[in-house]
Amino acid sequence: MTQGSALKLLIGFSLPLFLGNLFQQVYSMVDTIVVGRFVGVEALAALGAIGGFSFMVVGFAQGLGCGFAVLVSQCYGANDYDRMRKCYAMSIVASIVVGVIISALFFIFSMPLLELVRTPENIITMANDYISIIYIGLLASIFYNLFSSILRAVGDSRSPLLFLVISSVLNVVLDLFFVLVIPLACAGVAIATILSQAISAAISYVYIVRKFPIFKFRKNDFKLDFHIIRMLLKIGIPGAVQFSVCALGVIIVQIAINDFGSNIIAAYSIGTKIETIMSQMFTALGMAISTYAGQNLGAGEYERIKKGFAVCFALIVLWSLISYILSFFITEPLAYLFLDRQTSGQDVIDNAIIYVRTVIVFFIPLGMIFLFRTGCQGLGSGSIPMISSITELAARTIAAFTLPSVFGYLGICYASPVAWVCAAVILPICYAVQMHGIRTKLKIHPAG
């Protein structure tokens, strides 16, 4: 990442990540499709009702893994392999401790949280069955994301894609098994998800050991180094919390949606799944710029960092335009994947389409969030992602509790775009301040 064309590097790195992210979304999407088609609309609504909580734990795992890998990326860029291996070992230790604590807390308060957000009585038991199992299996998700982030930190974005393909296929098979053969409904698809992620994590770990000798642990690598652990937590926890803060905003919107009943919950669930699929290029570009920025910071390449951010922004604008055009062709067919045309109400599909075609207009600010949050995290900042996440949370909360009373369901659709715009406005300013600090630290003259 420290030599060659920034455009070619970022595109070449992002495309496997994009495909990998799509396969990762297959986990939750297949869950929803299997439940919607073989169990019913209420079960589909149950998965939709815990979408924010599921996003919270999955996002926490992603943020933690990406944050812990930042130090690995910087050490790799500086060719400091001994320290890189130590950071890797301490990231495993920190992941276990943090994961167990978070998993236990969420499992204990699972049902009270669902009651707090006013989950309808006809779906609350199924919702709790699913999310409780996801909480129990949080460590599987954390370690999969950690090992994938470590591979990306050293420039390998293709191997995680292969592992995801394998585990995604397994997830489909297990979903059908636990729903059709062993009729466990929502609990069954949760079990399938955790098993698939655990297998993917195990494959990733074995691959790292065999493919990259520089990661083979030595005798003292697991000797506790509290200085490195503090540095890991300083970057990783804010990264994890920022996803969780965003998820809290989603949960707040879910409270407003729950008052509309099961059909609207199901429609919103379908709409957000499609939105998530179409925005995966932003996630990929964010991961790419994080690795790119981390390695170039380690190498002291200030101008290449600036170039990388500019290239990523141009790619975000391009993908936003492509997504807008695609939305008119693929939204309806995708929506019909989730429900049987003959047994489900057309209003569920229509409302899902309304949601997608509303939010797609605001994809540029959404892409900016991924670019600057993860990019600034790759440069070593934990505070900038946190600031933007809190801004997004505040804006989404205000929108969720004001707009529906005026615009009804359409007000729900506008809640996320309002939050994206508010967060996107402040992030370029924070990035400029951070880059000024880096330039000063590297003692680079302002003119170049």
Image (tube, helix red, strand yellow):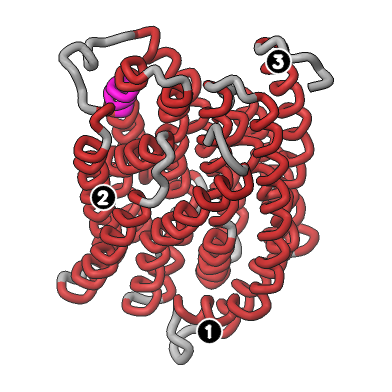
Observer-nearest of 33 and 399:
33
x%, y% of residue 361? 75, 62
The residue that appears at 69% across and 22% down in the rendered structure is 434
Instruction: Give the main secondary structure, helix, strand or loop, of the magenta stretch.
Output: helix
Amino acid type at circle 1 is Gly
Please, what secondary structure does the residue beneath circle 2 have? helix
Q: Is residue 82 magenta?
A: no
Q: Residue 393 falls in which quadrant of the image?
A: top right
Residue furthest bottom as drawn:
342
* Residue that mark 1 sits on: 345
Q: Residue 428 falls in which quadrant of the image?
A: top right
Observer-nearest of 182 and 171:
171
Please, what secondary structure does the residue beneath circle 1 have? loop
**Residue 107 shows in this picture:** no
x%, y% of residue 302? 66, 24
- Residue 351 against residue 396 in the figure, above or below: below
Q: Tell me which segment is drawn in magenta.
A: 88-95
**Residue 299 shows in this picture:** yes
Point out which mark residue 200 bears. Answer: 2
The residue that appears at 64% across and 27% down in the rendered structure is 384
